Amino acid sequence: MSAALRTALGVHQHAVSARLVRFTAEDLAGRLAGRDATIWSTEPAHIAVARNRLGWIESPGSMRARVSEFEAFANAVASEGFTHALLLGMGGSSLAPEVLRQVFGVAAGRLEVAVLDNTSPTAVAAAFAAHDPRRTLVLVASKSGGTLEVASFEKRAFEWMQAARGDQAGRAFVAITDPGTSLGQLAATRGYRHTFENPADIGGRYSALSCFGIVPAALLGVPLAALLDSAIAELDVAKLERDAARNAPLALGAALGELALVGRDKVTLVLGGGFDPH
């Protein structure tokens, strides 16, 4: 993928170009690579929030180092006869797994992954009715560990699993959460098979290439090394290209920001066939 981004911005081109000149002068690429939280604000409280949300910059690399761990986990659950996984999550904890399933599909011998992120009683009942608790692994995903909707899903799922597995119900559950959360504590109490702790400095909206996306991807049989290597390569280009006009992430950010300032705050993505889930 090229580091340059081509745009057709019409009357907005001048404002975006001016913003990119500022980005270059301020060395935004270098500052972002260095996790400089003052990019967003000079207020100490805002800086503290930004500083605790920049883990996505290192996430592809840190997840790449754990590929063997994720793949060993996926191998183990498949070898024990699990054929399906039901992910309980909301927002950032569920969107990436759903996209990965639609784009990559399911590799031979791996698990079909479905997502429950709809609190409608009809949707909840349908999700459980569509799965065999004796062959289904339940992923409970919550960054905070206290998401009300996910906690409600988990309660229903555990009762459902206990009816089929009795005291061994916990062996069919996996938690994905930040360190030290109530979900982590619940997982220990209930005897979950495993708890994957995600780096706490990755915001939910930026968690696709963290445990929240990579654990379900491993179950699907997505080629993790190739996926993460491509992300690392893109990050390396973005970090090294100091000319903001030639730095695709910065160019896109400048365009989105300047257009939002004048009320153009909706984005439509038209993707190529390689991303077509159908």
Image (cartoon, rainbow, N blue to C red):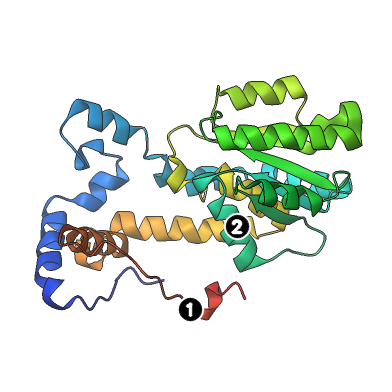
On the rendered image, what quadrant is the N terminus found in?
Answer: bottom left
Query: For this view, does 164 lie left or right of residue 86?
Result: right
Asked where in the image residue 211 lies, by quadrant, the reply is top right
Q: Residue at x 55, y 28 (%)?
A: 146
Q: Does residue 278 lie above or below 15 as drawn?
A: below
Per the model, the C-alpha gap separating discs 2 and 1 is 18 Å
Residue type, label 1: Gly
Q: Does the residue at mark 2 contact the one at mark 1 (Cβ under 8 Å)?
A: no
Tell me which label, 2 or 1, sits earlier in the chain.
Answer: 2
Q: Is residue 67 visible?
A: no
Q: Does residue 189 lie above or below 146 as drawn?
A: above
Asked where in the image residue 263 lies, by quadrant, the reply is bottom left
Residue 94 vs residue 26, the one in the foreground: 94
SS for tag 2?
A: helix
SS for tag 1?
A: loop
- Pointer 1 residue: 272
Q: Residue at x 24, y 26 (%)?
A: 45
- Pointer 2 residue: 98
Residue type, label 2: Glu
On the rendered image, what quadrant is the C terminus found in?
Answer: bottom right
Query: For this view, does 53 lie left or right of residue 157?
Result: left
Query: Where is residue 205 shown, x and y percent of the image?
Result: 44, 46
Query: Where is residue 143 shown, x and y percent of the image?
Result: 52, 35
Badge 1: residue crowd in 10 Å (few <14, some 14–19, many ≥20): few
